[in-house]
Image (cartoon, rainbow, N blue to C red):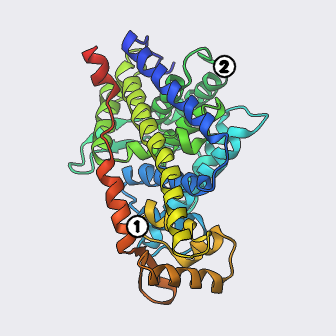
Amino acid sequence: MLYELPALAAQDEKVLAEIEDMRRDLKYRLAVTHRWDGQLRRQLQARAIQGSNSIEGYRASVEDIESIMAGEEPLETSGSVAREIAGYQQALTYIQLLSKAPAFRFDAGVLNALNFMMIGHHHAKAPGVIRPGGIYVRNSDTGEVVYEGPDAEQVPELLQGLVEWLDHGDLDAPSYVRAAMAHLNLVKIHPWRDGNGRMSRALQTLVLGRDRITTPEFCSIEEWLGKQRSTVEYYDVLGEVGRRRWSPHGHTLPWVRFCLRAHHLQAQEVRRRLSEAGEIWMLLEEQVDADGLNARCVSALYEVFVNRRLRRSRYQADETLSQGQAARDLRDLAAKGWLKPYGETKGRFYAPGARMARIKADFADRMTPLEDPYRRAGRA
C-alpha cells in the first residue's frame, strides 16, 4: 500500500488549470528558437541543482554550478560539494534523456541507477543498492528522530509497488498530482542509505518530463523548494502528511497543495525570466551595435546580466571562439564599462561594470511580486 492521491477541491482544480495554461504558453514560446534559449536552459538547470542540493546542506553558487556542469573547476565551491553537484547533474542529464526516450518503463533498476549517479562517490554508503537495515531521519539541530523508514525487509516490495503504480496507476490523474505523490512515496520509503531526498525530487521531475509537460528544466520545482522559506515549509508538510513512521493513508491533500502552489509560483518565475530574456537580449543588441562591438558580445553581456560573473572559458565555449578572440572581446567590453575584471589567470572572471549594473538595477526595480494562487483562490 502507498500514500494515496487525494480528492481535489474546486480551488485546487482552478490552480491546476492555471498551471496548465502557463505551461502550455511556455511550451508554445519555446517552440520558436531564440539565441538566448541555451543560456536560459543552462541557468534553470543550474538553479534546480542548486535548490535540491542546498536542502541537503550542499551549497554552491549558480556560477560555480555552471562551471561544474561544463567540467571546469569552480572558483569558490569546495571539492566535496563539487562532487555532490556533479553527481546530481549527471542524474538530471539522464532524466532529460529518459524524458524523451520513445520506449521507457519505470523500474527499480532505473531508480537505483539514478541514486548511483548522484552519490556514487560515497562508496561506503552503497550507492544504488537498497539499504540493508533501518534508517532514521533526524532534526539537524536537535538530533531528534523525526522519521523512521519502513523495515528493510519491506523496502523491495514497497519500491516495486511504487514503480508498478508509476507505470499503471492513476494514469487519468493530473500529471502534477501524480508527480507529487511519486515524490512523497519515494521519500517515505527511503530505500537507500543516502540521497533519498534528492532522488524523490528528481523522480518528481522525471514523472513530469515523461508526461511531456515541458522539458525538465522548465517543469522542475527544485529551485523553488531550495529557497529558505520554502525549504522550511517543505519539511513541515512532509512531516505533517508523512507522519513519523511509514503509515500510508489518503489524507495527502496538504502535500499536493504545497506542490501545486510551488509549481504555480515557479511557472510565474520562469515565464518572467523568459520574457525578460528576450527584452534584455534585444536591448543589449542595440547597445553593442551602437558601441561598434561584435554582435556575438551580446552573449557575454547576457550571461553577466543573469548571473553575478562570467569566465572567459564560458563565453569562449558559448560562441565557439579561440581563446584570443574571447579574451579580446572581454577586454573591449571592460574598456567600454560593460564588464569589470577581477583576479588573474585561471581565477580571472568578469562582473557587471557600471553600464551593466545600471541595466540590472532598472530591471530589478520593475520586478513585480509573484502571486500566491491559493491566497487569491481563498479570496474568490
Instruction: Kindly give the residue lying farthest to the bottom in the view shown.
Output: 344
> Residue drawn 32% across and 60% down?
361
User: Residue placed farthest to the front in the image?
Assistant: 290
Numbered disc total = 2
In the image shown, does 337 or 174 lie closer to the viewer?
Answer: 337
Q: Who's the residue at 52% across and 25% down the image? A: 21
Q: In this rendered view, identify the residue nearer to me: 241 or 194.
A: 241
**Residue furthest out toward the right:** 103
For residue 168, which numbered disc appears in the image? 2
Q: Quadrant of residue 28?
A: top right
Residue type, label 1: Arg
Across and down, in percent, residue 247 comes to: 40, 22
Residues at discs 1 and 2 in contact (Cβ within 8 Å): no
Q: Is residue 162 above or below residue 72?
A: above
Marked residue nearer the N-terminal end (1 or 2): 2
Q: Is residue 14 above or below residue 111?
A: above
Q: Which residue is mark 1?
A: 308
Q: Is residue 194 visible?
A: no
Report if residue 7 is visible in the image.
yes
Location of residue 13 with respect to 147 vertically, above or below: above
